[in-house]
Amino acid sequence: MYTVSITRLRVRTVFYMPLFMLHALRTMRQAQKAPGVLGVETRFEKNNVVWTKTIWSEESAMKKYRASGAHQIAMRLLAEMCNEASYTRWEQNEPALPTWEEAHAKILQTGKLSKLKHPSALHTAGKTAPEQMMPGFVPPMPPA
């Protein structure tokens, strides 16, 4: 079985975007090199929304990544920088990343909210994402 992890983050103001992007690039590089990772992808939407999806050979590899290095540092800043933050995780038989449509559906079905200092109305209402998937784009991945 393979572990899939999805996150949806909304940076609460454009003024936090440079700091957010610095940490996002560092965590992406860390993820690309992490033992057990099989795939990493990021998606941007309007209104400062960033999605990530990763797939891992086993859950323990994902947990080790999550609790170390650049990712651990970025997680400490999340509550201040973001006004929406949700995640979900599941096991699947195939070693392939799900589509963004599948990721969106899963976060609506099984997503959990992170604790934030300045939650948006959507987050306060207990919603993990808008019901409709927003248009977005997938940027090229930075070199590992």
Image: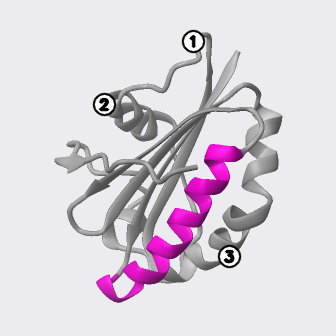
Q: Tell me where the magenta segment starts and ends, as one range.
A: 13-33
Q: Nearer the viewer, residue 7 or 137?
A: 137
Q: Nearer the N terminus, badge 2 or badge 3?
A: 3
Residue at 63 percent of width and 71 percent of height: 74
Q: Nearer the viewer, residue 73 or 101?
A: 73
Residue found at the very far front of the displayed protein = 143
Where in the figure is residue 142, as x and y percent of width and height?
47, 54
Query: CA gap, disc 1 to disc 3?
Result: 32 Å
Q: Is residue 4 above or below residue 137?
A: above
Q: Nearer the N terminus, badge 1 or badge 3?
A: 3
Q: In what element is the residue under mark 2?
A: helix
Which quadrant of the view contains residue 102?
top left
Q: Is residue 48 magenta?
A: no
Q: Is residue 9 above or below residue 129?
A: below
Badge 1 is on which residue? 94
Prevailing secondary structure class for the magenta stretch in the rendered image? helix
Q: Is residue 93 above or below residue 23?
A: above
Q: Nearer the viewer, residue 138 or 49?
A: 138
Badge 2 is on which residue? 101
Q: Residues within 10 Å of mark 2 (few under 14, many from 20)?
A: few
Residue at 30 percent of width and 46 percent of height: 138
Residue found at the very far top of the displayed protein = 93
Residue at 48 percent of width and 82 percent of height: 19
Instruction: Tell me the number on the disc at residue 76.
Output: 3
Q: Amino acid at mark 1?
A: Glu
Is label 1 or label 3 in front? 1
Query: CA gap, disc 2 to disc 3?
Result: 29 Å
Q: Nearer the viewer, residue 36 or 52?
A: 36
Q: In what element is the residue under mark 3?
A: helix
The N terminus appears in which quarter of the rendering? top right
